[in-house]
Amino acid sequence: MPLREQRDVKEIEGVLNRILSTASPPVARCRLLSSGFGESYALNVEQDIRGHKECLGCGNCIDACPFLFREPSRRDKTEQRTSMALETIVGADCDECDACVLACPQVDTTIKNYVVNHRMIEVMSKLEQRIGDEDEPDLDLLVEEALS
Amino acid sequence: MDFEIPEELKMVQSMVREFVTDQLKPLERVVLGRAADLSDAQMYLPLEKERELMGMVKDMGLWGVSIPEELGGVGLSTLGNCLVEEELAQTVVPFDFGDVTPILFDCNQRQQETYFMPVLNRQKYPYLALMEPEKEASEIEKLEVKAEKANGGYVLNGKKVSLSRAAEDYFAVVFATTNLEKPLREGVSCFLVDKGAPGFSVSGGGGKTGWQARVRQAISLIFDHCQVPVGNMLGEEGKAFYLARKWLPLRRIIRGARCIGAGQRVLDECTIQAKTWTSFGQMISGRPSIQAALADIATNIHAARLMVYEAAWKADQGELIRREAAMVKLFATQMLHSVADNAAHIFNAPAYVGGLPMERFCRNAIATSATNFALQLQRNIIARDILKGLKV
C-alpha cells in the first residue's frame, strides 16, 4: 500500500526505462524506486514501517509471470514467493512483459501507469515477435512430408 | 449446418470401400507374411500386383485423387480425399490412389514432364532428401548440404537421409543451402537430382523381408561435387521452405483421416473379439469394462472424425485452416494411441501376436504418437493462433 505522495516518474524515467528494458524481472527494482509502505497498511507489526520498501512475499509476481506459466518446473526450485525468488528462477529468460510490476502491491501506481501507457505497446510487439510470424513457413509440414 | 456428405463423395467413398474390402484386405497376408516365422513378410506389394491394382483404380477414374486437375489428377476436394484416405487406412496393405508429394506440385512445365508425370504413373520414385544424418527433425534449419554456383549450375556437397520408398528408377528432391548469408529460411533451395548424376550415389533401403519389413529402412544419399543444372531447381532460389505452402496444411488433415481409418479398423477387430471371446463361461462383450473400452474407442473416433470433416470442409470453403489442421493432427494422433491402449484392454494384452493386422495397427499407432516433438509443435501453432487475439 504505497504512500499517498508517490514517486514522480519524470524524476526516474531514465533509470526506469533502463530497468524495464533489461531482460530480468523488473518488479524488485521498481519496488525500490517506489515510495514504500503508506500509513494505512494492515500488517500486524509494532514497528513503524511507513516508507519501508521490503517485498511482502505475497507471490503475486510469481503467479503473474507468463514464463513460469510455460515452465512451471522452475517454480520447484524454491518455495519462496518473493521478487528475489522470481529474479533468481526466471533471470535472463524474462519475457519483459512487465506483468510482475503490475501485480506487485508495493509498486507505486504512478510507475504502473507509466508501464501501461508507455511500455505495454512496445512490449506487445516484442512478444508478438517471440510468438512467431504468420508468414513464416511451417517447417514441420515439410518434416512430416519427408517422414510419411 | 449440414452434416450430410455430398452424394458424389458418398459414391466415391463406397467405391473405395468396396475396393479395399475386395482387393486390398485379401492381400494383408502377403504383406504380413504367411510363414510361421513371418520370414516372408514384405514392406510393399509385389510390383506386378501393384500395377494390376493401379490399372483397376485408373479404370475407376480415381487415380491421383489428391492431385489437382491441371496436373493430370482427379482434383478431389479435401473432404473427398479424407474419405478416400479413411477407407484406405483400414488395411495394412500399403497402397494409395496415386499419391504424390505436394512439393512436386511446384514443378515447371519441363519438370512436370520429366519428373512429376513419371512419379504419378509410378515409373519413377522421388527420394525426398530433407533430413541429414545424425540430426534431429528439429534441426532442419541447420542444413549442412550446400549448393554452390559453378559452371552455370550448382555443385552439391554433403550427405542426406531419406525415408522414401526405395526403387529401381528414382531421382532425389534435395534441400540444400544456397546462401549462407541470408536467413536460413530464405537461403535454402530445392533441387531435382537424377539417378546416375555424376557425384550422386545412394545406398541402403529396400529389399528387406521378414521382421525388417516392419521398419522402413533409411536411404543414404551422398553428393560429392554433384553438378546440377539450373533448370533442375524446384521453385525459386532460396525459397525451398515455401514450396507447397498451399497444399501441405491440407495433408495434415488428410493424415488425420488416416488415423480415423486405422482407429475404425481397430474398433471393428475389437468388436469381433468382444463378440467371440469367452472367459469364465461368459462372452467378454457382456463385461462392463469391455463395453466401456469399446465405448471410449468409438467416442474418440467419432470426435476425431467430426474434427477432420469440419477442417476439411473449411479448407474446401477456402478458409484458413492452420489452427484446425494442427488441432486435427494433435488430437487424431493422440486418439489413435488411446484407441490402441483400449484395444489392448479388450484383447486382454497388448496385441503382440506378430502377423496379425491388429499387431501392425497398434504398433503403427504407438509409433505415430511417439513423435512428441511434432505434437508439441502443433500445440505451439494452436497457442500462437489463440494469442493473436491479445494484440494491443
Image (cartoon, coloured by chain):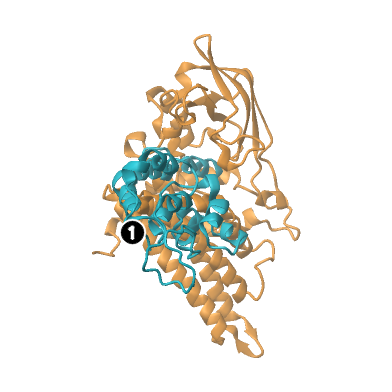
Chain colours: A cyan, B orange
**Three-letter amino acid code at the position of disc 1:** Glu
- Tell which of B262 and B159 is nearer to you: B159
Q: Can you name the residue that lies furthest to the right here?
A: B37
Which percent across, then down, holds residue B287? 57, 86
Look at 49% across and 74% down and name the residue there: B296
Tally the marks.
1
Which percent across, then down, holds residue A44? 47, 74
Q: On the rendered image, what quadrant is the N terminus of chain B found in?
A: bottom left
Left or right, B96 with reference to B66: right
- Say above or below: B294 vs B378: below
Q: Can you name the residue that lies furthest to the left here?
A: B1
Look at 39% across and 47% down and name the residue there: B250
Look at 62% across and 59% down and name the residue there: A77
Look at 55% across and 20% down and name the residue there: B147
Question: Dividing the picture into quarters, in which one does residue B369 lie?
Answer: bottom right
Instruction: Write down the chain letter for disc 1.
Output: B
- Say above or below: A125 vs B341: above
Q: Disc 1 designates what residue?
A: B310
- Say above or below: B157 vs B138: above
